[in-house]
Image (cartoon, rainbow, N blue to C red):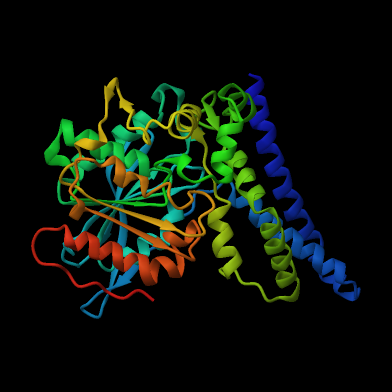
Amino acid sequence: MRYMLTYDIMESMRVTNQWMGSTARAMCSYPQLGLFANPWIKMTAAWGEVAERSFARMAIKPDWGIHSIPADDGRDHTVTVEPVRELPFGDLIRFNVHGRAPTGRKVLLVAPMSGHYATLLRSTVLSLLPDCDVYVTDWHNARDIPVSAGKFDIEDYTLYLVDFLRVMGPDTHVIAVCQPAPLALAATAYLAEEDPEAQPRSLTLIGGPINPDAAATDVTDFGRRVTMGQLERMVIQRVGFKYAGAGRSVYPGLQQLSSFMAMNAEKHATAFAEQIMRVAKGEAGDHDKHNKFYDEYLAVMDMTAEFYLSTVERIFKGLEIAENRFSVAGKMVDIGKITTVAVKTVEGGKDDISAPGQCVAALDLCTGLPAHLKASYLEPEAGHYGIFAGKSWRNRIRPLVLDFIDAHSEGAKPTVRAVK
């Protein structure tokens, strides 16, 4: 019960800060205050607007906001998000481009379950849609899943990927971004033995911790310093009474967000200070660069405790994927059994979360894969987010990934559209 209480206290703090922001904005917006030439009135109102929006976003699942895309026929085609497979902890969704023939590239974009919603990959999806039929793993917020739905750890995550790949069929190309890279590799190896016909044609791993020991970062250093007992005591809480998952043990999204923010505290503080000044001067917009980024960045979700703890214990501490000792449902998964699926790794030279060397380690594990089915790419100036979003992704990495997909597809190779 004490953990449920601490969860509710944390949520109460968020609501209080949202209320304080709303109150400050409202109180400083009275017309009569315009008679006073005091800049602090405008500054307080601006702080209130930024604070209210920021703390409100933390409890909202963002919308994909992708309604149409242009096509080769010169028309805008409407896009709808449709569920393909619905499971308790996550769905397989499809971005259906109405009125467009299949592109010849069926892509499963595996979103991370690391505190943010799958919509963190919105720009990645938008950049792929003109050239691909895009499917995404849409993970659910653990606080909204009743305890009766059972557990969800990294083995369950792997089996979800196996299930999704079986649904999509063997002509699928997988792109796994960050955290799910080692589990996408494990799922492919699992299928290689259990259901070879369901294997994807290619697997692209972007900035994932295949071997966390290959290059140290703050994330890996933290994993080494803390014991599992300490970690469980420090970060695991039980969902409060307000949500459907009341009583479920989780790693709260708000706690993960505080860790994200602390890693670049000065940068975030400067960004918010500058945004308050822009609001005070009337220069900010509802969809300006700051709001566009932080509306997504601040929207966080809870992870099940067992998923978070098993990730730290087995991927980072135990190095089960790195040393090819990972098991699923009591069965050892041998990555060396992958013999026909083309594997490509992508890393960023300035990635401070999954440093260069961690992801490319996957190629050494694929001992049964011929050299012509392996590829790697390092984007020297890209940080962690740059390798799947932004200019580095759009201008250099995306074309390379599509070329890799085409090189390992059957039939005619589609034309790659430029993304601006």
Compared to residue 417, the image places residue 353 above or below, namely above
- Give percent across and percent down for residue 92: 30, 44
Compared to residue 401, the image places residue 144 above or below, namely above
Q: Quadrant of the C terminus?
A: bottom left
Q: Nearer the viewer, residue 187 or 216?
A: 216
- Give percent across and percent down for residue 356: 45, 53
Residue lying farthest to the bottom in this orientation: 74
Q: Quadrant of the N terminus?
A: top right
> For residue 31, what is the image quadrant?
bottom right
> For residue 81, what is the image quadrant?
bottom left
Compared to residue 93, the image places residue 152 above or below, namely above
35 left or right of 251 in image:
right
Q: Nearer the viewer, residue 182 or 81?
A: 182
Residue 30 visible, this angle: no
Residue 60 visible, this angle: yes
Q: Residue at x 30, y 68 (%)?
A: 399
- Give percent across and percent down for residue 104: 16, 62
Q: Residue at x 32, y 70 (%)?
A: 69
Q: Residue at x 90, y 75 (%)?
A: 35
- Give percent across and percent down for residue 40: 86, 67
22 left or right of 389 in image:
right
Residue lying farthest to the left in this orientation: 411
Total count of labels: 0
Q: Nearer the viewer, residue 400 or 281?
A: 400
